[in-house]
């Protein structure tokens, strides 16, 4: 059996970071569907203005950048992961506090809430790795 090329050999430690990187790719794509494509398709199907249910933001792009940094193990990956995790956790917890004080369980807000639960879980896991396992962010 041959040994895989160096770029494909990862220690178990790096594998956790890379797995979370792939998780953020999935979350970014899922966010694009939930925030943009589903509302666009719905609006088109019911003759509504196309942007009437879209929640505009650029977080999916930020998540893709983070995913790329984690998967490629960019030199700044740990600092980026720490900063984005803290910012996202604060924002999502604040949004949850506001939302849950007077919830509006429409299809749009329910989709948003479910998306944010998974995004929050991913960032909590990433912040755990940043704080408790800094050695996981070293070179390959």
Image: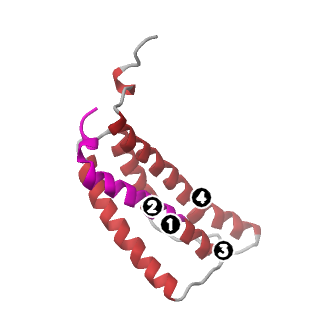
Determine which of the numbered discs, if any, sits on residue 121 in the image: 2
| Label 4 to label 1: alpha-carbon separation | 16 Å
Judge depth for marks 2 and 3 and give the one in front: 2
The answer to if 46 sits in the magenta stretch is no
**Label drawn at residue 33:** 4
Q: Quadrant of residue 6?
A: top left
**38 up-or-down from 104: above or below:** above
**SS at circle 1:** helix
Closer to the N terminus: mark 2 or mark 3?
Answer: 3
Counting the numbered discs, the total is 4
Circle 1 packing at 10 Å, graded few (<14), some (14-19), many (20+), is few
The residue that disc 1 covers is 117
Image side of residue 99 versus residue 43, left or right: left
- The Cα–Cα distance between marks 3 and 4, rounded to whole angstroms, is 14 Å
The image position of residue 106, as x and y in percent, is 65, 79
**Range of residues picked out in magenta:** 115-140
User: Secondary structure under badge 4?
Assistant: helix
Asked whether 58 or 107 is in front, the reply is 107
> What residue do we see at 42% from left, 72% from top?
92
């Amino acid at each position: 059996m041959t040994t895989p090329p160096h770029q494909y050999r990862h220690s178990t430690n790096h594998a956790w970071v890379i797995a979370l990187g792939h998780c953020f790719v999935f979350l970014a794509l899922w966010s694009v569907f939930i925030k943009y494509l589903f509302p666009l398709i719905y609006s088109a199907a019911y003759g509504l203005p196309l942007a009437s249910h879209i929640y505009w933001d650029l977080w999916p792009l930020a998540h893709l950048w983070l995913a790329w940094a984690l998967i490629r193990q960019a030199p700044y990956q740990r600092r980026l992961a720490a900063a984005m995790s803290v910012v996202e956790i604060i924002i999502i917890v604040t949004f949850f506090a506001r939302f849950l004080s007077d919830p509006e369980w429409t299809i749009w807000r329910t989709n948003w809430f479910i998306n944010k639960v998974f995004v929050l879980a991913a960032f909590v896991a990433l912040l755990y790795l940043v704080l408790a396992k800094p050695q996981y962010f070293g070179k390959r």
